[in-house]
Image (cartoon, grey):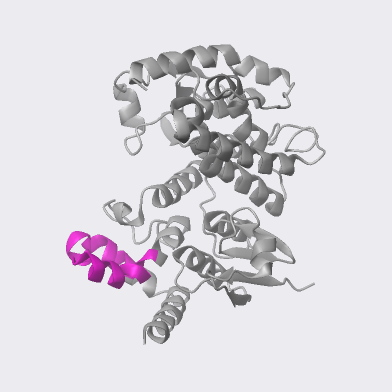
Amino acid sequence: MASSDHMVLLDFLGSPFGMRVRLALAAKGIEYQIEEEDLTQSKSSLLLKVNPVHKKIPVLIHNGKPICESLIIVEYIDEVWKDRCPLLPADPYQRAKAKFWADFIDKMVYPPSDKVWAANGEEQEAGKKEFIDRIKLLEGELKSNPYFGGETLDFLDIAFLPLYYWFHTFETFGKFSIEAECMEEEFVYASLPHPHKVYDLAIEYKKKLGI
Amino acid sequence: MADEIILLDFWPSMFGMRVRLALAEKGLKYEYREEDLWNKSPLLLEMNPVHKKIPVLIHNGKPICESLIIVQYIDEVWCDKSPLLPSDPYQRAQARFWADYIDKKSALSFWKESLEKPYFGGEKIGFVDVALVTFSCWFYAYETFGNFSIEAECPKLIAWTKRCMERRACRLLWKIHTRSMALSWG
């Protein structure tokens, strides 16, 4: 990274989307400043200025220019710092596959996962079933490799991993067990909050939002 | 070895049209296969077992799914002509952001965005133009069902649509689409 690069990440502790960006930045060894947003309070003027369209975190501000949407940010980081630790494969077909599964996580895995911790009764049960069915599909993509990226963590591992840190929360609220493989890369542990912290946050979040 | 390109599609699909447009912009020959969405072919179910949806591009036997992912794939493989995404990473991120917005919110809400240059891609048609223009084939249907005039609401966007239609690839798509509509609706 050039000494003149200035990186700011607007984020919220516990956000799996923000975690993706932190993982990508850590994988590339990029220094950055965190601006913590509290999503249970009103949004900061900075957030509203840099993401006027969606008003959501994460937002990466690179030398004053904002980039929004977690997977788009991760891809941007991969393209700008292409000299180290590639996150997306070089082959266009493999790239398309990685993007397809990351898109699947966003469209088909996150929505039911919200019901697992935030909903009750039948809605929660339906969410649980959908969530498990869909992560099983994703598990099929892992095949016999240690990571989605083969022997190393890549884009799809980064897309999915933060959700793993919510598994303890899902299992506790949803009263079920998910078996998952833990990624052991050092930078992963350094970048992500402890699962129990995420659970405590979910309890607090539910109280504040009255759900 | 010559590339074998097959597109599984459904003629009114705005998502399928994005892929047809990208293939046309790149001057690529491909085999078009119409799917009956109420009776999906074994090939579609094999090539897209996860979503079972069109469009699916099959390039030398390998399937690529999701319209914007397919368009980006086409842009990367045939990178020697008519680039759809800008080369600058920040501009690329912006293009991806707006295409994602179109899919998440709606194409119609995007019409309100102001357009400074001839195309969203600048002086030439780009990724966001491809993501959006195919919705213009549905204008007549929207206006009829919704009982309103799109040109009255968003004159700049109609002007942009007309500019896109000046491009041969878009005109061909429009011609095929309107012919198919006439055949279907009688």
Q: Give the number of marks.
A: 0
What is the chief secondary structure element of the magenta stretch?
helix
Left or right: A168 in relation to B101? right
Residue shown at 43% from the left, 78% from the top: B177
Which residue is located at x 40 percent, y 57 percent? B122
What is the quadrant of the N terminus of chain B in the image? bottom right
Q: Position of residue A71 (x, y in %)?
A: 54, 38
Quadrant position of residue B33: bottom right
Kindly tell me whether residue A63 is visible in this rendering: no
Q: Is residue B118 above or below residue A193?
A: below
* Location of residue A186 (image quadrant): top right
Query: What percent of the width, then of the height, locates residue A34?
Result: 47, 17
- Front position in the image: A107 or A87: A107
- Which quadrant would the C terminus of chain B be assigned to in this image? bottom left
Residue at the spot x=43%, y=51% of the render?
Answer: B103
Instruction: Tell whether position B25 is magenta.
Output: no
Q: What percent of the width, then of the height, locates residue B160? A: 32, 65
The residue sitting at 59% across, 27% down in the picture is A162
Range shown magenta: B135-161
